[in-house]
């Protein structure tokens, strides 16, 4: 098995700030980071909205 030691990718400050912003905004869900050739190319945020059934009953 080959032993590859690639240099860690450098992430631009604006990309890191956007990742931090998106993480701060989400309460329930996920943040997916797409990477191609060691570079972040896309962020996808999925957020869940849930309501307590006991609160919504009449």
Image (tube, rainbow, N blue to C red):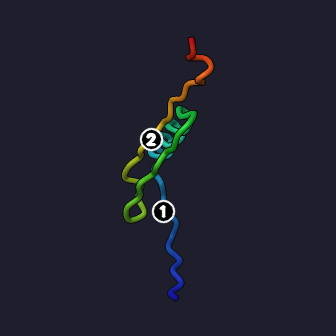
How would you rate the neighbour count of disc 1 (Cα within 10 Å): few for under 14, some for 14-19, many for 20 or more?
few
| Image coords of residue 31 (percent x, y) | 49, 45
Compared with residue 49, is residue 3 higher up or lower down, i.e. above or below? below
**Are the residues flagged by discs 1 and 2 in contact, CB closer than 8 Å?**
no
| Marks 1/2: CA–CA distance | 22 Å
Query: Residue at label 2?
Result: 45
Query: Residue at label 1?
Result: 9
Q: Earlier in the sequence, mark 1 or mark 2?
A: 1
Q: Residue furthest right?
A: 54
Residue depicted at x 61% and y 17% = 55
Give the foreground label among 1 and 2: 2
Q: Residue furthest top?
A: 58
Residue depicted at x 45% and y 41% = 45
Q: Residue furthest front?
A: 58
In the picture, the quarter occupied by the C terminus is: top right
Residue depicted at x 50% and y 41% = 17
Disc 1 element: loop
């Amino acid at each position: 098995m080959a032993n590859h030691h690639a240099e860690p990718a450098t992430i631009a400050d604006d990309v890191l700030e956007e990742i931090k912003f998106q993480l701060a905004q989400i309460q329930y869900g996920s943040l997916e980071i797409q990477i191609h050739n060691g570079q972040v190319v896309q962020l996808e945020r999925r957020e869940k909205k849930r309501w307590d059934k006991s609160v919504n009953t009449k």
